[in-house]
Amino acid sequence: MSLENVKELIQESNKITILTGAGMSTESGISDFRSPGGVWSKYKTVTIQEFISDREKRIYYWKYKSETIPSMLKAKPNHAHLAIGKLDQQGKLFWLLTQNIDGLHEKGGVDKKRIIRLHGTNRETICLSCNRVIDIKPVLERIDIGEVEPKCEKCGGLLKPNTVSFGQGLNPEHLVIAEKASRECDLFMALGTSLQVFPANSFVDVAYSNGKPVIIVNRDPTPYDDLAKYRLSESLAKILPMII
Ligand SMILES: [Zn+2]
């Protein structure tokens, strides 16, 4: 295999579905939540059930979110995000399925309408009562001036960052689209994801079992490497601009 082969395959494809994980954003300075030193090793997790029923947990959750989200909001897309943005501008991106909650794909030039945010986004909050979604910045400003558990200004319901919390299922509509995106694409790429989390990893199976070529780019080995037509372990920010 040479990089030329990979590049050719991408050039020949017109309906590409891409699945991305934390490895996409490490070069934008956002650490993998699961890695040592990542958010999950520093902060205790709060389940959705605890968030709803326990005021102390809610205050704790918002405290850690208000300490971690601002740096995420300041992060810039790296060359890997920009390469995927270019693919979309060329009309070759079918769907982008991302496990990331940092919003960097939108900033990197991918049309929001083509992104399925499997785990939600830290750039918005949602009201758990009326489902109203608003930008997170004004909510973080309210915390800065002393609110500890922000409530919805319309209905008084609990506000939560619009991410999928522990104990919360993924959006079923998203799963339907993601399955279709994996089945109907002409090339499937898994980028910067360890492919250890269900159901994200199952989309590789769907693509593969429907005869679609799979490209995997990830620093560490994944359980799906044997299915891949091409498997690369280079840095995404370095390699994607070379093949897209
Ligand atoms: Zn509300």
Image: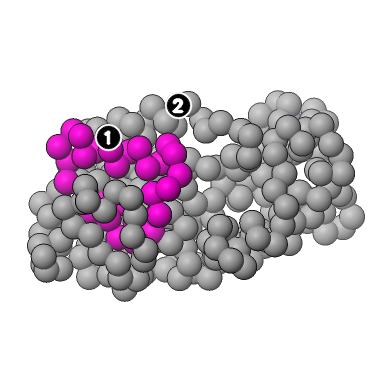
Q: Residue at x 61, y 50 (%)?
A: 122
Within 10 Å of disc 1 (Cα), the crowding (few <14, some 14-19, many 20+) is: some
Q: Amino acid at mark 2?
A: Glu
Residue 190 covered by magenta stretch: yes
Measured Cα–Cα span from mark 2 to mark 1:
17 Å
Q: Is residue 20 left or right of residue 48?
A: left
Residues 209 and 12: in front is: 209
Q: In the current view of this chain or complex, which residue is farthest to the right?
A: 146
Quadrant containing ligand 1 reads top right
Residue bounds of the magenta highlight = 189-218
* Residue of label 1: 206
Residue carrying label 2:
173
Say if 26 sits above or below 45 in the image: below
Q: Amino acid at mark 1?
A: Val
Identify the image quadrant of residue 105: bottom left
Q: Confirm whether residue 138 shows in the render.
A: no
The x, y position of residue 97, in whole percent, is 39, 44
Identify the element where label 2 is drawn.
Answer: helix
Residue 96 pos. (x, y %): 36, 45
Q: Which is more toward the observer, 117 or 140?
A: 117
